[in-house]
Amino acid sequence: MEKAKFIWMDGKFIPWDNAKVHILSHVVHYGTSVFEGIRCYKNKKGSAIFRLENHTNRLFDSAKIYRMEISYTKEEINNVIVETIRKNKLDACYIRPLVYRGYGELGVNPFDSPVKVSIAVWKWGKYLGPEAIEKGVETVVSTWQRMAPNTFPAMAKAGANYMNSQLIKMEAILRGVTEGIALDIFGYVSEGSGENFFCIKDGVIYTPQLGASILLGITRHSVIKIARDLGYEVKEQFIPRELLYICDEAFFTGSAAEITPIRMIDKLKVGKGERGPITKKLQEEFFKITAGEDKYNWLTWV
Ligand SMILES: Cc1ncc(COP(=O)(O)O)c(C=O)c1O
C-alpha cells in the first residue's frame, strides 16, 4: 500500500510509521473492531467524499451493536476525516475510520478495554483490478456461507466478520477467479466478501434484502436509488442460486468495488459474458455523481 504522512489516532496526528497498537490490545486477539471504508474522489470541482455522513452513521451503528462507546460526536469524526485528508495533502483516496478495543484486560470480556478511534487515508486504485469496471470479473459461488443471523450480526461492519470474508476471498483466488459469491445459511444469495450483489433478469433488478446476512451497503443504497429514478424496477428479495446462472447481467457494489460487472459465475457466462447495458447505464450515472454532478447531495467537499 502507498503510505500517506499521518494517521489520526485518538485526537492526534501520528506519523504513518509510528501509528501502532500494543500487541496485547483486545482487538489483536479477538477482532474487537468496527470500521468503515469510504472513498474520496477527485473531480473538476475538487475532492469529494462520497456519502460521508451515511458512513459515519453506520460506524456509530456498528459500534452500538457491540456496545462500544465512541468518545467523539459524529460531527467531530466527519471533521477529522476531512482534516486528515487535508493534512495528508491527498485528493483521491480511500478512508478507513476504525473503532477498536485497545490495551486493558485480555479476557474475552471487552468492557475493561478502552474504545479507541483511528482514521487513516491513502491512495487506492480500483479494488477488483484496473480493468474490472469495464470488463467485469469472474466469480464462483463460495462453499463458505455468510454468518447465520444469530451469530455475527451482518449489519455491523465488524472486523471479526472479515474472517468469514477472507475464507470466501481465499477460496475464490485459489479457484482462479477474482471474487466469491456467498450464500446465506438458508441457501439464498447473500453477498461477496466485500461487496453487495445485484443481478438483472428481464429488465428487473434484484438484490438480496436486509436480513440475508448482508451488510447494508451504502453503494447498494445509492444504486437502488439511481436505478429507481431511472425508471427500473428494483426488487430486494430472496435470490435463489439458480438465478445467478440464468440472469442477463450481474454486478457487485461497494465503496471499494464501486459498480463492478460480473461476467462469469461458476464458469457460466452471465448474459453475453461481458458488462451488460443496464450495468453500464448505472455505472455512468454513478460516476457522474462522483465526478461532481451531485444531484442527490451525496458529496462532502474537502
Ligand atoms: C461484506 C460487505 N458487503 C457489502 C459492502 C459494500 O458496502 P458499501 O457500499 O457501504 O461500501 C462491503 C464494503 O464495505 C462489505 O465489506
Image (spheres, rainbow, N blue to C red):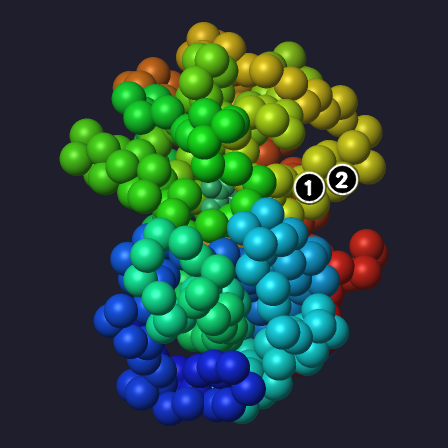
- Of 269 and 183, the residue lying toward us: 183
| x 47%, y 81%: residue | 9
| x 62%, y 22%: residue | 206
Q: Which residue does the numbered mark 1 point to in the structure image?
A: 221
Any part of residue 3 in sight: yes
- Of 272 and 175, the residue lying toward us: 175
Residue 35 spot, x, y in % from top left: 50, 59
Q: Quadrant of the N terminus?
A: bottom left
Q: Which residue does the numbered mark 2 point to in the structure image?
A: 225
Side (left or right) of 92 relative to 209: left
- Above or below — where is 269 with respect to 164? above
Q: Secondary structure at mark 1?
A: helix
Residue 212 occupies quadrant: top right
Label 1 close to label 2 by CB (< 8 Å): yes
Can you tell me whether the CB of the residue at mark 1 lies under 8 Å from the nearest atom of ligand 1?
Answer: yes
- Of 187 and 176, the residue lying toward us: 187
Q: Secondary structure at mark 2?
A: helix
